Amino acid sequence: MAINPKIKQKAEDIRNKIYGKEVRESLASGIEAISEDVEATIGRQGYVEEQFQDVLDETTGKGVISAPELIAARNGKSNLKTRLDEEHAQVTAQLQQKEQELNAQLAQNDDKAIDIRKLGARLDGVNNDIHYIRQAIEEGYKNIYIPGTGVCLISGTVEIPSNTNIFGDGIGRTIVKLRDDSNTKMFTNLSTANETTKDKNITLSDMTIDGNQANQSGTVLHGVVRFSYAENIVVKNVHAKNGMGTGITVEHVDHFLFEVCLSSGNRDDGFSAGWLSKNGTLRRCKAFENVVSNGTNNQNGIEVEDGASNVTLIDCESRDNTVNYEIKNHTGWEGRPRVENVKVIGCRSIFTTQGGNFHMSVLGDGCDGLSVRDFETIGYGQYISLQNIENTTIDGIHLKPIEINSAETAYGILIQARDGGEVDSVVMNNISIEDTANWGIIIRSAGTERIGKVSLNNVFAKNNGHNTASSDIIRCGIRVQNVETLSLSNIQAISEDDIQRRGISLHSTVGDVTLSSAILKGHNQNLQFDEGVNLVESAVIK
């Protein structure tokens, strides 16, 4: 059948249009043209049927069997009705096929990117471009492009729906900045408080997002990027900076990825995975200088908190934050799930100036299932504090301050049970600690809290305890108390100066101790243990 020229023209329009509004108009007018053609066909059918009935009326009972017009109208079919029914079915099938093609074209259009400049965005850092990002979302675009040709100024929150990707040209090229006195978070998902209807499959990538903290007011901790009650969230190659709250945060999010992201100068944490978020990865992320005081919170570089589980940090770096890495449940979270199954692999902690705080801190209810491997510390930072940890493996830590300062109270690694918690099933392998002001490693409870089984293997402790104002039980390589079962294997505790210190000191509250393959030398007391400690020595050199 020949294609109606009007429909053919509409089809060409659909093929050639690019942007959503034009495509939708072409689709609509194309469907209207098809409908008009079908209506015309139906009209012609009605006219032919009337003619057929007239022929029947003229020939019935008059001995006329047929006429040339009637035979031609049947077009080889047994009767005219059969022919018309078949043609009607063909037109209906063609209309359905065209509808499917148009729907496919519409779906293809939804996958295309919209440059927000096409909608009117100025990107001049003066005019407010929030409307054009929202317009792209409202028009159903799933890939929204913010080009790196200037500064995209926004005055409100961009609420991203499911199955949407907002992207730019890269960090430092595409810049989205919060307008003065807007006092709001910048990017979030659409249903941030709906646990039953979660937003899914959202990506934010390739841009710098500037919270313009210096020109905001109020004390509310608005995050730069904050996703809540969502699934499958990806934030990639994004620099979140100068926010009134956290840089990049997930809460109640299942499956998330932060990859090659930066977070700096924020009023709260750089990165935060919390509030029961689970199954997430931070890969090659850097948090630095999140130290701006907000009066109530410490600024952590990377934080896993409040019931989060199955979170992995890989090849991350945290520098010059109040605390570089923190794992905890906040006050008020008591009785709810602990943080569980956190892996820290190949990460670095750096403090470039004196007065640096914790390299890593586990607080509150602690963590069940902590794994730290190849953790590097650089600079002045004080220590690693691990509270209420269970089922924990630490393999590969080197601690050496950049400068010895005997006035500091720093130690290397503290493992502690406190506030009603406990420590159990902890294995530490391949640890090197040098030149701390006090203990190299201290294991203890704050009161009567239980510490079960602890194992230290391949530990090198050298010249720990420089703070001469402290007592000799503090100035030592390894100090242990309140542990039920302790295993020490391949231990080197060495002192190379004239400071009075101890190598290994075991308190009377320690239960069964196995000490093997140890080299202890240069201390005024290489090995000191109180009465009541059940010690088995093997191959110890003093």
Image (spheres, grey):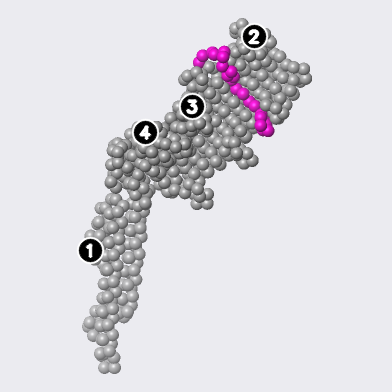
Across and down, in percent, residue 290 comes to 46, 29
Q: Position of residue 328 (x, y in %)?
A: 58, 34
Answer with mark 4 or mark 2, whichever residue precedes in sequence.
Answer: 4
Name the residue tied to disc 2: 500
Q: Residues within 10 Å of mark 4 (few under 14, many from 20)?
A: some
Separation of marks 1 and 4 at Cα, in angstroms: 49 Å
- Amino acid carrying mark 1 in the image: Lys
In this picture, residue 469 sits left or right of residue 201: right
Q: Position of residue 336 (x, y in %)?
A: 62, 41
Q: Which residue is found at the position 36% from the left and 60% from the top?
A: 100
Q: Any mark on residue 321, and which?
A: 3
Sequence-wise first label, 1 or 4:
1
**What amino acid does circle 2 point to?**
Gln
Q: CA distance from mark 1 to mark 2?
A: 99 Å
Q: Which residues are magenta?
A: 402-424
Answer yes or no: is residue 348 visible.
Answer: no
Q: Are marks 1 and 2 in contact (CB under 8 Å)?
A: no
Q: Quadrant of the C terminus?
A: top right
Query: Nearer the observer, disc 4 or disc 2?
Result: 2
Q: Earlier in the sequence, mark 3 or mark 4?
A: 4
Q: Is residue 205 above or below residue 286?
A: below
Residue contact at pointers 4 and 2, CB within 8 angstroms: no
Q: Quadrant of residue 337?
A: top right
Find out whether the residues at labels 3 and 4 contact each other: C-beta distance under 8 Å. no
Based on the displayed image, in which of its 4 quarters is residue 362 positioned? top right
Secondary structure of residue under mark 1: helix
Q: Which residue is mark 1?
A: 6
- Residue carrying label 4: 171
